Amino acid sequence: MRAARLVFDEMPHRDVVSWNSLISAYSRGGWYRECLELFHGLVRARAGGGVQPNGVTVTSALHACAQLKAFDFGVDVLRIANEIRLDMDVAGWNSVIGFYAKCGRLQHARQLLERMPKKDAVSYSAMITGYMNSGHVDEGMDLFRQADAKGINTWNALISGLIQNGQQSDVLGLLHEMMGASILPNAATLSIIMPSLPLFSTLQGAKQAHGYVIRNDYDQSNHVVSALIDSYSKAGFLDIARKVFELNENRSTFAWTSIISAVAAHGDVTEALALFDQMVSAGTRPDTVTFTVVLNSCAHAGMVAEARELFHSMQAVFGISPVMEQYACMVSVLSRAGMLKDALELVNKMPFEPNAKVWGALFSGAAAAGDVELGRFVFDRLFIIEPKNTVPLFSTLLGAKQVHGYVIRNDYDQSNNVRSALIDAYSKAGFLDIARKVFELNENRNTFAWTSIVSAVAAHGDITYALALFNQMVSTRRPDTVTFTAVLNACSHAGKVQIKWSQADEEH
């Protein structure tokens, strides 16, 4: 791509074809920021009376905006499309629907789908993917059933969405339904299901998939090769995973990242880093996922110097701006090594607000070092982001009673999430009586608080009292699926089958 850009930059006269060649290549190749930068250059040239963008330009730029979730930029692209009165074909409509869906504007995307004069399988796939990415599984499934144009990509969108939302158990049935409709799994299907279904983490499952891959000539697909590497590695056969990688003639970033990850997962971080060097020497550009893998490996192996060098090289050598995942990895590297001051300094220098993963990595280091002051500092920040999970985390450093005191002194004790977490912390520490007291002092009990005390009492073996609490709850508040899970688990341990079915029936 760099060579192509050099040729483009040296061209004395550029027409729309030359602009589109590079813009679309950037978009297809995952160089999304470069794609939008070049599109912006085209817009400037247009303002000076130069070349006009066309459908290819707009479609490529919108795809990049969708991948980056760059909503404002995408709106500007659409504004330009309107200015030049672009006549949208099916591919154009699909790119707009995909853009809105990817950016979470599902209602707008669905309205466009309904208005679309002629829909194809890609149209439905884009909308289904949008629903699934936002956790709207039922809406995605309903649209799939309604779709009058289904192709392998539509099936793949649904399968991928189910896996993404933790519904792997439904996937095998869907695969059988797909093949019953005379649609066979393709390379994309295999790359989706193999890393996610337990069946393919066994030697037998991996070999069966491998046979299907060879019979259908998918063995040079980098995504399929990566899935095979992952399957054999999880099954414990790293030597076969290596062989699969070595037989792949056109190794992409994805394939290299998979073998590096497999080797690191088997504990050989030195070889994993050597493979990273081989990858770079072979002219393959690492991406953010590659860096996450190698930085995580360094964190587990305590390789601080190597991690720092890799982190620095992201921007300096490869022109990749670190995102949250890489910052979290680097904070973990420093925290695990006891370099808490350096870790905090890195957090403070981040170009965006740290998320719970970053603060959690720093907290783990503080807990390991027994640094209560830093732990409290992190607690305050984590509480804003994830109040439900912060109290149990803080309890590992101070203990339930000390955390309770800290919560009261800092006026966190009116939060139902915090009270529920305290109930859980006291229960796990063996102080069910204090857990009950915390619950009783809570005047505004929500479903989460009720579920916490029901779970705590059940965990201590008093199933009768847990069911009594559940009945009290039902008289004032509607239980959710988590509540039912707690009650049903308690009943299963106590053998109260009749009770649990009647409780569930009353609510449905």
Image (tube, rainbow, N blue to C red):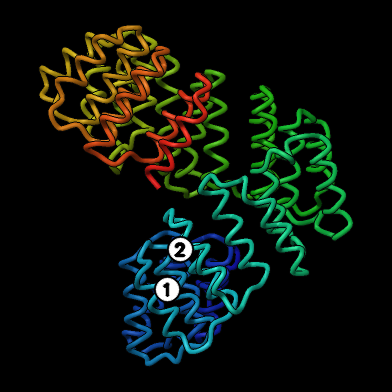
Q: Which percent across, then down, holds residue 163? A: 57, 49
Q: Which percent across, then down, holds residue 234? A: 71, 32
- What is the total number of numbered labels drawn onto the structure image? 2
Q: Which residue is mark 1?
A: 39
Q: Is residue 165 left or right of residue 181?
A: left
Q: Which percent across, then down, holds residue 38? A: 44, 70
Instruction: State the mark number for residue 249.
Output: none
Q: Residue at x 45, y 30 (%)?
A: 499
> In the image shown, does 422 or 486 lie closer to the viewer?
486
> In the image shown, does 330 or 411 lie closer to the viewer?
411
Q: Is residue 176 left or right of residue 475?
A: right
> In the image shown, does 129 or 87 lie closer to the viewer?
129
Q: Residue at x 42, y 85 (%)?
A: 115
Q: Which residue is mark 2?
A: 139
Q: Residues within 10 Å of mark 1 (few under 14, many from 20)?
A: many
In this rendering, the label closer to the viewer, 1 or 2: 2
**In the picture shown, does residue 17 fall above or below 317?**
below
Question: Which kind of residue does numbered mark 1 sit on?
Answer: Phe
**In the picture shown, does residue 33 fall above or below 265?**
below
Q: Residue at x 75, y 48 (%)?
A: 225
Q: Is residue 147 left or right of residue 180?
A: left
**Image quadrant for the N terminus?**
bottom right
Q: Would you say the residues marked 1 and 2 are in contact, meaning their CB atoms lie under 8 Å apart?
A: no
Can see residue 5? no
**Mark 2 element type:** helix
Q: Residue at x 68, y 59 (%)?
A: 188
Question: Which kind of residue does numbered mark 2 sit on?
Answer: Glu
Q: Residues within 10 Å of mark 2 (few under 14, many from 20)?
A: some
